[in-house]
Image (cartoon, rainbow, N blue to C red):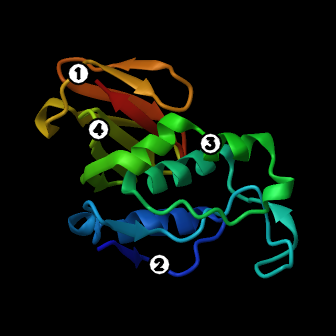
Amino acid sequence: HANMWRMVGDAWDIWGDVTHLMDVADSWYDYIRPGTWPDCDMIPLGHISIRGERGEDRMTRLTPAEQYSLMNLFLILRSPLMFGGDLPTMDDFTLSLLSNDKAIAANMYGTDVRRIFHEDGKLAITSKDSRNGLNYLAIFNANEEATEISVNLKDNGISGKKALNIWDDSTLKAKDGVLTVTLEPHSSLLLSIK
C-alpha cells in the first residue's frame, strides 16, 4: 500500500517557498520510507503561469542556483516529481533539470532518508540507493551570503573519500572523514559517495 502525503499548499517560484519546504520537511523525515512519499507539491520551473493564475505569463522567477536547490530538495526527499511548467515551451536548462538519470535515481531509489543538520541556513540530508548502497548527500545554503558548510561523513555512517557532483560530474574530496564546501547564496549540491 503506497501513501503520498501532501506536505504544503502550492509551492511557487519564489525562494521563500523553497525555504518553507525545507522547514516543513523537518517534521517528515520519520515518515519517509518505502511505500511513502512526502509531496512537496509541483515543480514550478520553466514557462509557468501561462493563464495568469499567479501573475503574468513568465519563465520561473527562481535563479538557476535556486532551481537546482528546489530540484535537489525534491530529489533527496523522494518527493513525487510533478512538473508545473509548460512542456511544449520548455527551455533546455529546465529539460536538463528534469532528465538527469543520476539525479532521478536518487529520487527513485533513495531510502533511509535522514536529515543530518538544519541550522543557521545550512541543511544536509542523506539517503542510500536501495539497489547498491551508494550514499547520496544533499547540502543546501539558504543564507544570503556564501557560506562554508562541513558534513562529518564518518560520524553519519557514510564511508568514502570522494563525492561526485551528480549534476556536473565534478569530484569533491573529504579530508579525515569530513566534507567541507563553500556554497554561494541559495545554492546546493547533490552528491553521490561510493
Q: Identity of the amino acid at label 2? A: Val
Up/down of 162 relative to 188, above or below: above
First in sequence, mark 3 or 2: give its number. Answer: 2
First in sequence, mark 4 or 2: give its number. Answer: 2
How dense is the environment of label 2, judged by Cα within 10 Å: few (below 14), some, or many (20 and up)? some
Give the secondary structure at mark 1: loop
Q: Which residue corresponds to mark 1?
A: 160
Q: Which residue corresponds to mark 4?
A: 131
Mark nearest the camera among 4 and 2 is 4
Q: Which residue corresponds to mark 3?
A: 99
Q: Which residue corresponds to mark 2?
A: 8
Q: Is residue 175 left or right of residue 169?
A: left
Quarter of the image where the C terminus is located: top left
Q: Position of residue 166 (x, y in %)?
A: 48, 31
The residue lying toward the viewer, choosing from 66 and 143, is 66
Q: CA distance from mark 4 to mark 2?
A: 30 Å
Q: Position of residue 84 (x, y in %)?
A: 68, 66
